[in-house]
Amino acid sequence: MSRAAAPLQWLTMGLLALGLLGLSPALSLSLLAFGLAVLTALKLREARSLEERRVVALLQLVCAGLLAALRPELAPSLLQGLAILMALAGLLALELGAGPDWKALLRRSLQVLLAALPIALVLFLLLPRLMPFTNFGAGQGMGAMTGLSDSMEPGSIARLAVSRQAAARVAFPLGGEPPPLEQRYWRVLVHERFDGRSWRSAAPTFARPAVGQATPPPPPPAAPGEGIQLWLIEPSGLAAVPWSGSGRPLSADLNLQRSGELLNRAPGSQRRVYALTRTADQPGWRTAPPGPVDLLLPLGENPRLEALAAGWRRLGSDRERLDAASGWFRSQPFRYTLEPGALPRQAPLDHFLFESRLGFCGHYASAFTTLMRAAGVPARVVSGYRGGQWVQPVGGTGYVDLRQADAHAWSEVWLAGEGWRRVDPTAWAAGDPLARPGASGAGIRAGGGPLDWIQQQWWGLDIAWARWWLGYDGEQQQALVARLLGEQRHLLGVVVLLAVAVSLAAGLGGLGWLGRRHRGDPLRLELERTLRAFARQGMAPAAGETLGGFARRLSQRWPSLADPLEAFVANYQQQRFAAAPSRAGRRTAHRLGRVLRRSLRTGNRPAEAVQRDHP
Amino acid sequence: MPSSPLQPVISAIGEVLLGKEHQVRLALACLLARGHLLIEDLPGMGKTTLAEALARSFGLGFKRVSFTSDLLPADLTGLNVFDPAAASFRFQPGPLFSQVLLADEINRASPRTQSALLEAMAAGRVSVDGTSHPLPRPFLVIATQNGLDQGGTSALPESQLDRFLMRLSLGYPPRQAERALLQGEGLRPDGLSGAFGPEDLLALQDRCDRQHCSTALLDYVLDLLERSRRQPSQAHPLSPRAGLALLAAARAWSLLEGRDHVIPDDVQAVLAAVCEHRMDGGQRGGGEGELSQRLQEGVDGLR
């Protein structure tokens, strides 16, 4: 056992602990990973013998595998890779004897990983998928995270507007420009229930899968040339995820609500990746007719507002009422500010509309929607993100970087014959950040420093990883199989087995080649093999001991081995130190080594067995 | 196992010096490597016997000088005396001009006399009044030194210690050998008749130089030297001369073992004798070789 074994194993433990930090305790599998890691650490603490340390190394590898299933994103994957490298080096330190040092162990460990790469690739590409583990047994309600919430009060978005925290990123990998800045409205939540103070979302309704069907059938893959939008969202605690409002979800666990919310079956307690197609045609939610809830308004709360809207009720069509309301809005001296002061409890919207006239998106959306409902036009508040900075990472796919500061709220108004129309009253107010010349996103954002730049480059890598690695799902796999095998799909099992066998052989061959090239000398190789055979019997050379000295000790322990030992040692020394070693001598070394090891195996049987053989 | 060409000598000396085969082999190796031998021991342990047995085994001329505090350099080297018959000075060689010189209790002499001896050992010649006189070949000095705790001694300077290829300590004989000694079973050294002559010894010395040292072996020796220079103890590091001495002694040992090439086991066999006195600076009289033991354990012996 190398002296590096214990430090390597502790180092692995540290890396695994680091990987555990990012796990959400809401997933039941996380608890399993935590438990396994603690168990492994305890075992490592008490491990003394070679066998125990071996068990520790295997537990560490299982632990890293579990982590890899739970956290497949780029950064955790790198960490897991490092942990596996260290765990393997630790295992090698146990198996390769005292010889190799840290550097040699790590190099060998890397070689082993490289040798495993072909088989991993085959399994990744061809083996049928499990569902992502992150979808199993997700708990509900992660508590308040920074971000949007189900319930929107006029003042609630103000605290987000100064937050630089990352919210989401969206890339358009299969060609296509990002939408123009004025079109970048990313909807998340639709608030339809208004109690006079706050706006709430409707309870989500999931289409239940049929009985006996564990998962809903996978949606058809994106048609060629359709384009996709690839989203990476940070943990939000919400079931609803941002999207552009058009397109079709490409994974089965996304559910498009009638209101136009896109729901994730598991609430976002972890970072998540999902993809949608990017179609220009009208999605269904836009023409889904309003329900009675879209006109509900607690009467008498804001009398001046109701009086104003009552004037517009006389107008013939909803469209005219909308025009009247927007005309009135534009004529008033509203001013955008993030610090409008608290609204009074009595008639808060009256106060905002007719007295203070100071506010931000939440106030405008809330007041405008209320006005429209009071005028008899179905309307609702939508919250999500607006704008976002277009980032073009070096040599990668561009993406829109959304921060919590980009959080926004706007209105949607139902117009007969057209459907839901987006109306953003905030844009009419003086000082709206997006209307400012030169604004890249919501203009509260400070200019990006070098750290920001590095982070944005990293996110670019993250997106590429998500696209090529996480994005390779069951549908993509089926497409690949179809392309490879065509009609011969039933041969998949044979193909997988063959590919596994070939890549295994290639990996092992490469490993052997690397090992031989590294150690070079067959004579030395033979010696090490023989030393390992004796090490398994508990005999290892002492510090500084020569082969001759070691052989003398061995013949004392196993007198029956004296002859083969002497022959082996004499030949070795001859080959190593005499003036003219011969190729034949190296072959002899191999033969003598085999003889010696065989005698060790047979001579090591219990004494009576030997006696029975040789009476 | 190939038999040693010198086995007859080893057995013969073994008859005289009972139970000391390893030391006898080391002394022979020292002789074959053209080195000089320092024996450090208490009186009465068989130092003189060993020296005399070595000399007689090869039919070499043997002289013994007891070093005393009043011994002068000229008493060793000899001096020019006036020859009235020839009316000129004639060089009268001293005891140094013998093939084997036993310098008994070298640490009792004055440093000046010690120095004269050591210079002669190093140079193989003696200069008297400007004339250089070559010493006979082969030439072996066996110096003995009492334990330093004994009175009236002046220790050899550190810098002179490595003129000696090896330092040995004979130690007490094993009980069985001492019983034989007491029973009078040991032979007297003068009973030894050499199967070898001085010419054979010179030939053997030349053969020593031709013992093969492979790169693997040189790497081992180099690792030992490097290790001695990096180890954190107070031990003196080994000089390049020490490296040469180690290799020469290992060559001689491999010849004694009956091989034509040197293996790490040979190096280890002579390591303590060659290196201990160079590393401890003469401070630890007759130590158990723990410095060289530690050095040996610090270098991988599996080559």
Image (cartoon, grey):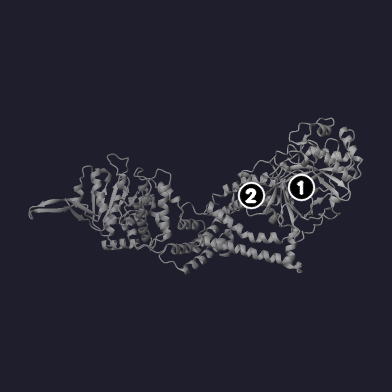
Judge the density around disc 2: few (<14), some (14-19), many (≥20) Cα neighbours within 10 Å.
some
Report the side of A54 relative to A295 (left or right): left
Q: Earlier in the sequence, mark 1 or mark 2?
A: 1
| Residue at point 27%, 39% (across, down) | B152
For disc 2, the chain is: A
Nearest to the observer: residue A278 or residue B283 = A278
Nearest to the observer: residue B62 or residue A352 = A352
Residue at the spot of label 1: A186
Magenta span covers which residues? A79-83
| Residue at point 50%, 68% (across, down) | A587
Q: To which quarter of the image does residue B149 belong?
A: top left
Q: Is residue A537 visible?
A: no
Nearest to the observer: residue B136 or residue A442 = A442
Assess whether residue B178 is covered by the magenta stretch: no
Residue at the spot of label 2: A457
Measured from the top left, where is residue A213 in percent x and y? 83, 55
Position of residue A338 relative to residue A123, above or below, is: above
Measured from the top left, where is residue A168 in percent x and y? 72, 47
Kind of residue at badge 2 = Gln
For disc 1, the chain is: A
Report the side of A444 relative to A325 (left or right): left
Q: Is residue A219 visible?
A: yes
Position of residue A502 relative to residue A435, above or below, is: below
Measured from the top left, where is residue A41 in percent x and y? 64, 45
Judge the density around disc 1: few (<14), some (14-19), many (≥20) Cα neighbours within 10 Å.
many
